[in-house]
Amino acid sequence: MTDTDPNSGPVPAPEAVSPPEAVVNDATAPAGGVLPGLVEEPSGPQTFRTDAAAKDGLNKCARCGSTDVALNPATGKLRCAFCRFEWDTVTMNEAFGLDQGIGELRGVVMGSGSADIVPSTDVVVTFKCGACGAEVVIDTDHSTQARCHWCRNVLSMNQQIPNGAVPDMVLPFRIPKAEAVKKIAEFVGKRKFYAHPRFKAEFNPENVMGIYLPYMVVDVNAHARFEGQGEHQTRSYTVKVGDRHERRYDADLYAVTREFDLHVNDLTVESSSEKLSRTSSATNNIINSIMPFDVENAVAYDSNYLSGYTSERRDTNLDQLSPLVHAQTGDIARHQAIPSLAFYDRGVRWDRERVDVIGQRWVSAYLPVWLYSYHQDKGGGRSQLHYVAVNARTGETMGSVPINQARLITASAVAQVFGTILAILIFLVG
Amino acid sequence: MLEITTEALVAAAQVMASEGDDDARSIGLVFLLAGPIFYWVIYMRYRNSDKRHHHELETEAKIHDLQQTDEFVQARKGLTSSSMKGANYKDVRGTVR
């Protein structure tokens, strides 16, 4: 194997015609397949504790002692609702150096909030109010805070229990509700003509909900090796076949290998099994499409960031998400190799691929989404959940709008008539 | 509506042109599919069922210690396709289905 400048093309072709050595099929690596997996993994996952300083119960404002604390989206800081005092929370990158040392990762490293969910762990958790002693219940499926019904203090759950409710970090909302409403209205406004009449009548973007959805953020240290063949075009010309002219191409075939270390930073995957599913009953691809988030600005988890928003509890474990992360690492490796393949203007066919995950660091996160949902009853017991989603950090908006099929089919028929007339004219003239 | 219909038909013609087929009769055949093409274009614009996060492009990644070999094998003449048969270097397999 030789080292060459990745920006230059291959050395001019030698005279000898030799078959590529590296395309021998390997029983463990099917053609075109990625071989993910851990190599030399240290004994078991290594966990770093992310809730060491967290405290359950009454989280008070440092200045006035109030427990009414919420995010100020304009500044990204927590703000006391009584005295307006604002304070910052340290980012996870600053606290744990999550943006560093990817090349040194070995085996599985994970935040304590990413630990496996223990099925027997309660979803509804009861706390004793530190101010009045009353029992207060928090339904962790949708929130990690509750207001004491006696003394009106807010109780927060910040310590992690193995039910997936308290992640390692949270990325606060940045886009305010008014802006999200405007974006959703604009998005749907451009798709009104063929929209379902009932949807148009019922559409009200003010019903958008701010929701923290669960994700896993993964850093990957991998080693990739690709072997295959590439073609470089040398000539393009036309030949006469019967009474037709057809284009032909000449190309040089090369045996190609690329091998490199790959450091992936903040690969983000959904960790809600419901949002991961791709059935026809819900348009979950919409929520997927508004990624990426600027997770490098995520802060250590504090329930006060969730005040005024809802949340969805993580219900998948690392083992369930690993195949997806490894497959996506393979995709990233394949695409990272593309700039070094510029010489092969006709493309490259990888016959053998190997992507070994040497180390990986998993951190669970709540990421902010403005979500407008519309449940379409299609009749006959069939229904579909349509989403219009806004990334509450970047403002990226995507959605699914129910269609007025009768109108669209009629318009398609009209298009077909025009198209047929044009086709006849073309045939007659051409 | 007519305006959108025309746009869809023009788009369809452009698609065919981009395929490299400059035969007017082939474009005529595309116009014969104007109805289904129009339906598909509008359906995707409203439903966006093909949209997804492009993790392979939008995830921060760096490569180190790139080693590469490129060895000439043979010259191929008279190929009919404008791209390599079986090329898979841009494949994406990690999408959620």
Image (cartoon, coloured by chain):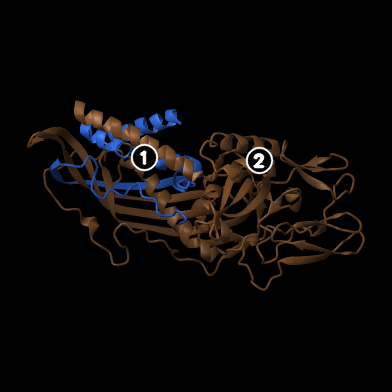
Chain colours: A brown, B blue
Q: How many marks?
A: 2
A164, A112: nearer the viewer: A164
Q: Residue furthest bottom?
A: A120
A194, A80: nearer the viewer: A194
Query: Is A324 left or right of A67, judged from the image as shown?
Result: left
Residue A164 horizontal/vertical position (percent): 65, 62
Q: How many residues crowd around disc 1 within 10 Å: few (fewer than 14), some, or many (20 or more)?
A: many
Query: Is A287 left or right of A262, judged from the image as shown?
Result: right
Residue A197 visible somewhere in the drawing: yes
The label on residue B52 is none
Query: Is A32 left or right of A158, judged from the image as shown?
Result: left
Query: Is B90 left or right of A102, judged from the image as shown?
Result: left
Name the residue type under label 2: Pro
Q: Which residue is mark 2?
A: A205
Name the residue type under label 1: Gly
Please identify the quarter of the rendering in which residue B40 is found: top left
Q: SS for tag 1?
A: helix
Q: Which residue is mark 1?
A: B35
Q: CA distance from mark 1 to mark 2?
A: 33 Å
Q: Quadrant of the C terminus of chain A?
A: top left
